[in-house]
Image (cartoon, rainbow, N blue to C red):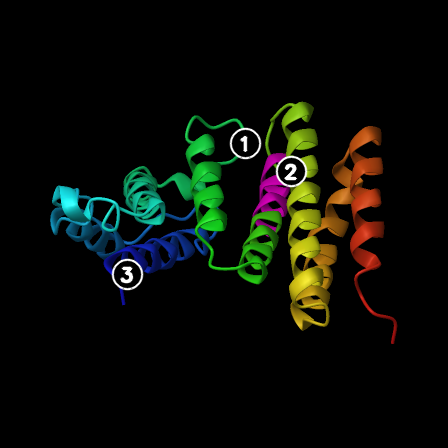
Amino acid sequence: MSSARQRRDRVLEQLTELQSLPLGGTPEQAFKDRLRAELLSGALVEEPEPTPSRRVHRRRPLLSQLAAVGLAGAMMVSSFATYQAVPGDSLYPLKRAAETTLVRLSTDDAERGRRELDSAKARAKEVASLLGSSIDGPLIDRTLKDMEESTRAGISRLERTEPRSPKIKKFAKDQKEAVKPMLQQLDEAQLAQAEGYLDYIEGLVEPK
């Protein structure tokens, strides 16, 4: 396996572990230590400049560069416990950037679709957290919209690559259970947005 592929796989594994953290959780010290060891081992060190005669053939792949950036981003995410951030927090953009990196480094459309749906689930949890706080309405509006956009992007990819995937039906069921209890706490505009979302995911569940 090439070094670029190995770096990419490490980034995906580390970001996936970060994304699986519950809202409000922080990475364990062992995970932080492992990321730090990756950096100190030279994972981000530039490869030696090739000789002129082989410069074209040994040019560092773009994917390798992305993997290096992703690994640095993962370290930053871990260090500042970004995955506990919710919309409005100063570290929230880092959380979203890490999610975007995770999607872009995915190996194919099916995997990208699944990770988009993971992001949609994260947005649902954030909405629930915001509703239990004194956060202003616009942040809830934006998070509901982001949830729907990630859902549609993920479903579109999965329907192209895995049209009969049981993951689609399970996702729709889980999201319905997550969003429906929020309805009574939403204002009129948010309620219309959430109900439209529920109508959409309801159509993803095949009739019995």
Q: Is residue 154 left or right of residue 17?
A: right
Residue identifier under label 2: 146
Residue identifier under label 3: 6
Q: CA distance from mark 3 to mark 2?
A: 32 Å
Q: Amino acid at mark 3?
A: Gln
Instruction: Identify the residue at image location x=58%, y=41%.
Output: 126
Residue identifier under label 1: 87
Look at the image and give the residue range highlighted in magenta.
121-130
Instruction: Identify the residue at image location x=88%, y=71%.
Output: 207
Q: Amino acid at mark 2?
A: Asp
* Outermost residue toward the right in this view: 207
* Outermost residue toward the bottom in this view: 208
Residue 156 locus on image (x, y percent): 70, 54
Instruction: Give the prevailing secondary structure in the magenta stretch.
Output: helix
Q: CA distance from mark 1 to mark 3?
A: 33 Å
In the displayed structure, would residue 87 be above or below residue 149?
Answer: above
Instruction: Identify the residue at image location x=80%, y=37%.
Output: 193
- Between 43 and 78, the one nearer to me in the picture: 43
For the residue labelled by badge 2, is the local secondary structure a helix, a strand or a loop? helix
